[in-house]
Amino acid sequence: MADITANFLGIKSPNPYWLASAPPTDKKINVLRALEAGWGGVVWKTLGSQVKNVSSRYSAVNFNNTRVMGFNNIELISDRPLDINLKEIKEVLKEFPDRAMVVSLMADNDKQSWHELIKKVEDTGAHGLELNFGCPHGMTERGMGAAVGQDPEIAKIVVEWVVEAAHIPVITKLTPNVHSVVPTGKAVVQAGTNALSLINTIQSVTGIDLDTYVPNPYVAGKSVFGGYCGPAVKPIALKFLATISQDPVTNKVPVSGIGGISTWKDAVEFMLLGASNVQVCTAVMKHGFRIIEDLCEGLNNYMDEKNFATIYDLIGKSVPTLTHWEDLDINYHHVANINQDKCIHCGLCYIACEDTSHQSISLTHGKPYNTYAIKEEECVGCNLCQLMCPVTDCITMVEQRVAPEYLNWKEFQKRGLPLNDH
């Protein structure tokens, strides 16, 4: 079988799956249960100055009979006493010395506070530190969390404080509540961070109670913007990860990928775009720690099928395929094809194309059912019909080429070619 062991900054684990800093990693009893189930490591829930959390704290977005497509929280960092957390971290390390133990930190905004907190955490024997520059609620009002991650200069200063004192690897966790993660990523890499992790949660309002008019979750009739995560944020996380992998400064350090990872396929996608390992939270909160078995088995099987010996054979493999729109081949074309043997005659493809796309599907009324066919000369290959079809492989996109040569938009304009001839 393929080797799925991971080595992230010298922090070794039997697989590349870590539990993200979140409620599942807030105490010893949870973490032990996770490691017993087979997780490669954990990022202990963020430690810092004492806070008091509110009730309630969570809400979710359900879609099309799928519960918790997106998950929202207004919970702060760990509200348990620091000394208890540190004691439990040390105890877990004694029981599972072969697993990754990274501790998330958010100290007060001064050098001494960071140095004192780092010393206490390092005394536990922890393997690494993750700096929480992403929490989008509560801590931002105190000038912490996303308030740091949104300002490259402040983030750089804090990382410089940290690397002055740290004797173990430093991972900086970036906020997605910015136009681009690259400026802050560059700043913290230049300041000396050993790695990056992303994304943290996205500011959100997940829904409003139509009787009370208060957004969820609510606290005594009030609410705040929360942090959004879960499967719904995966496309955004992948985009931000790709920009880090493409940048010549930020791609010099390893990245821990976070954001909506629920299956081994999700994990592979993050690795293909440059993540050296992945962190999981919402999927565990929904399904429990035992999903690690499927995550490892699926990754193993995929790597065997593709002849990848280690996870490092696939990391970043998809990054070169992401280019700019202006460099895409406008002579390349797709045409839809409907497999009549698989068609269930629901008409969803026809409705979508006729009402909202290019009127490229013909309808033939009949008994007992209508039939549909592609008007190839009208089809622009947009994929809409395939996306709407409820039957796997009923509609496929057939590759074609309008002209024999590769032609991008820049060259098209340069030659002064007429639009209506192409």
Image (spheres, grey):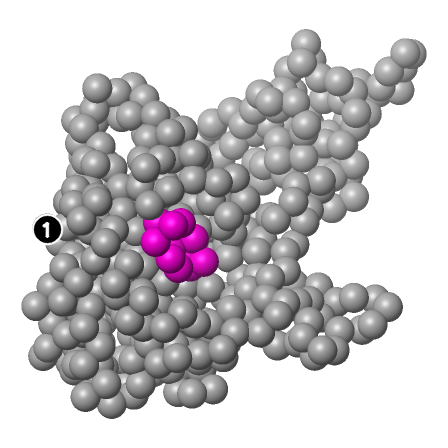
Which residue corresponds to the image point at 34% horizontal and 25% vertical from the top-left? 297
Packing grade of label 1 (10 A; few <14, some 14-19, many >=20) is few
In the rendered image, residue 33, in percent from the top left (x then y), is placed at: 37, 42
Is residue 40 shown left or right of residue 51? left
In the image, residue 396 above or below residue 84:
above
Is residue 324 visible from the viewing direction of this image?
no
Is residue 103 shown left or right of residue 266? left
Q: Quadrant of the N terminus?
A: top left
Picture quadrant where residue 127 is located: bottom left
What's the magenta bit mostly, secondary-structure-wise?
Answer: helix
The residue labelled by disc 1 is: 10
Which residue corresponds to the image point at 47% horizontal and 27% vertical from the top-left? 399
In the image, residue 317 above or below residue 395:
below
Is residue 13 visible from the viewing direction of this image?
yes
In the rendered image, residue 156, in percent from the top left (x then y), is placed at: 22, 80
In the rendered image, residue 238, in percent from the top left (x then y), is placed at: 40, 52
Picture quadrant where residue 245 is located: bottom left
In the image, residue 266 above or below residue 188:
above
Which residue corresponds to the image point at 60% horizontal and 48% vertical from the top-left? 69
Q: Nearer the viewer, residue 363 or 68?
A: 68
What segment is highlighted magenta in the picture?
21-31
| Amino acid type of the residue that numbered disc 1 sits on in the rendered structure | Gly
Dot 1: what SS? Answer: loop
In the rendered image, residue 262, in percent from the top left (x then y), is placed at: 46, 41
